Image: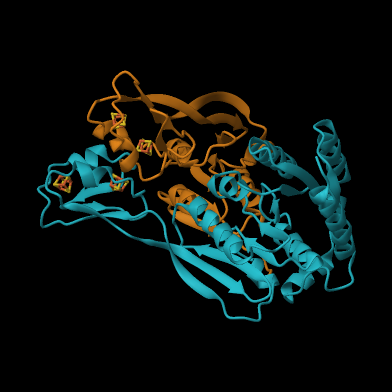
Amino acid sequence: MKIAVLSGKGGTGKTLVSVNLAVAAKEAVYIDCDVEEPNGHLFFEPKPIGSEQIVIKIPVVDEKLCNGCRKCVEFCKFNALAYINNKLIVFDEVCHSCGGCMLFCPEKALAEKEKMIGEVQYGVSENVTVVTGILNIGEASGIPIIKNLLNYAKGEQAITFIDCPPGSACIVMESIKDADYCILVAEPTFF
Amino acid sequence: MKQLLILSGKGGTGKTTLAGAFIKLAKAKAYADCDVDAPNLHLVMEQSVAPKRTDYYGLPKAVINTDQCLQCDLCRQNCRFEAINVNHEYKVDYYSCEGCGVCEIICPENAISLKPAVAGELVLYADETVFSTARLKMGSGTSGMLVTEVKKQMNLVAKDAELAIIDGSPGIGCPVIASLSGVDMVLIVAEPSISGISDMERIIKTAEQFQTRVAVCINKYDTNLVNTEKIESFCKKINLPVAGRIPFDSNAVKAINSALSIIDIDCTSGRAAREVFAKTVEFLFSKS
Ligand code: SF4
Ligand code: SF4
Ligand code: SF4
Ligand code: SF4
């Protein structure tokens, strides 16, 4: 069973609730999807078992092949490409890794390189397997990390608790995609 | 115009409460709420005029015309966001689609088109003061772009304002990065909890990438004095000015629940907020 713990605003005690639920369960997996501010591990201090680097694909241009047609620049919906001073420039931070520019370059001048955007760490703390996703500073989107994190969820005997990021944007939708139940942590204020 | 951005890394540190107090103390002619995912500033800042509302279009979403689709599977193979599913017919999952446009071009039957999609709403209150805010639709991406629009909307109408105060969003991702561009100074509202400290360090590093000036204040400092001192010595080590401490104050919650600012009533947190404000303005308008 997978239970996601959510809250509309931050600071309502979402992490407190999910950490303690995981401890109270006989056997549990705690997944911290709040990759921008992962905090759950601070309470568990898990014994580390391993980690995995999360990479995304970013285009690189072969300048010998590029003829400056700018088809890729026109295509990119995220304005991650520009052709300036006879050179194609890739803005890594805004690239969404859709692969379109590479697919559609008529000169086949684009290839992809891997770029690390963060890490998934896993470890144990007594009866709880603690899985934490960490987004590197300056990266815009943690969604590729969350996709990887959710692979650690266990279905059968153990209960998986998913500590979600605050709010209700795309990153939260990604975190609760496969959840069976959601717990909403609210606060009795006007906010 | 000088722009002051208030951030916190972690949510719930009292960022909006402090932003509201600052706006009142500064009699700011321009302010904005960039927490488009969970905007709250309008709840503390009473408005006398009706707002102007505009739909915000994020990136378009792909739509498959099933009459034209020959089920060749090319679109599904090439969509990097796993947004195309087959269940008798080919369909785009609205929430997963990022509007990249790959499928539109790859489809040999021209069965796919990108349709504009409303991703939220921009809200503008403008009389003598300008208040720009927005609300992102649930599950939408592109919050960074909406944040940029919120700031644009404010800057356009309030060109002559001397000081603009911007309430940021939690985290360090795209909305925060978007809110950082072009601001003169960031005030970080930290909390003396273990998670508060680690979040503060991450948000400081994010702000430093923009070479924005940073100051820190500590809210609810008396809930953990040891950690408060840790924060202060950390700031000292990396040469960040500390704008002050604000105590935990049950009157603050009461003020919020009666839609007042902490400086509207006589309370300890309100008094401390005044001092933090004076210090922050001093940093903001000082040279270097
Ligand atoms: S589409 Fe290819 S050839 Fe044209 S500008 Fe881009 S990289 Fe160069
Ligand atoms: S991979 Fe997609 S988002 Fe990145 S540069 Fe190419 S077209 Fe733009
Ligand atoms: S527009 Fe891009 S993300 Fe959306 S369905 Fe097409 S390929 Fe996938
Ligand atoms: S690429 Fe076009 S024709 Fe092929 S499955 Fe997709 S929508 Fe259908």
What residue is at 70 percent from the left and 61 percent from the top?
Answer: B16
Q: Residue at x 24, y 34 (%)?
A: A104
Front residue of A3/B32: it is: B32
- The N terminus of chain B lies in which quarter of the figure? bottom right
Quadrant occupied by the C terminus of chain B: top right
Q: Where in the figure is residue B130, as x and y percent of width and height?
A: 64, 69
What is the image's colouring?
by chain
- Closer-to-camera residue (B164/B216): B164
Residue B173 at what x, y percent from top left?
56, 44
Q: Is residue A129 above or below residue B192?
A: above
- Please state the total of marks drawn on the protein image: 0
Q: Quadrant of residue B210?
A: top right
Residue B42: image quadrant is bottom right
* Residue displayed at 79% across by 50% down: B284
Classify residue B228 as left or right of residue B9. right
Q: What is the drawing colour of chain A? A: orange
Can residue B36 be spotted in the picture? Answer: no
Q: Return the residue found at the far top.
A: A64
Depth check: give the residue in front, B235 or B150.
B150
**Front residue of this view, candidates B232 and A175:** B232
Work out whether residue B183 can be spotted: yes
In the image, the chain rendered in cyan is B
Q: Is residue B175 above or below residue B38?
A: above
Please tell me in which quarter of the rendered image ligand 1 is found: top left
Q: Please state the horizontal and vertical placement of residue B259, each as a whole percent of the image.
A: 72, 75
Quarter holding residue B251: bottom right
- Is A131 on the left or on the right of A84, as rendered? right
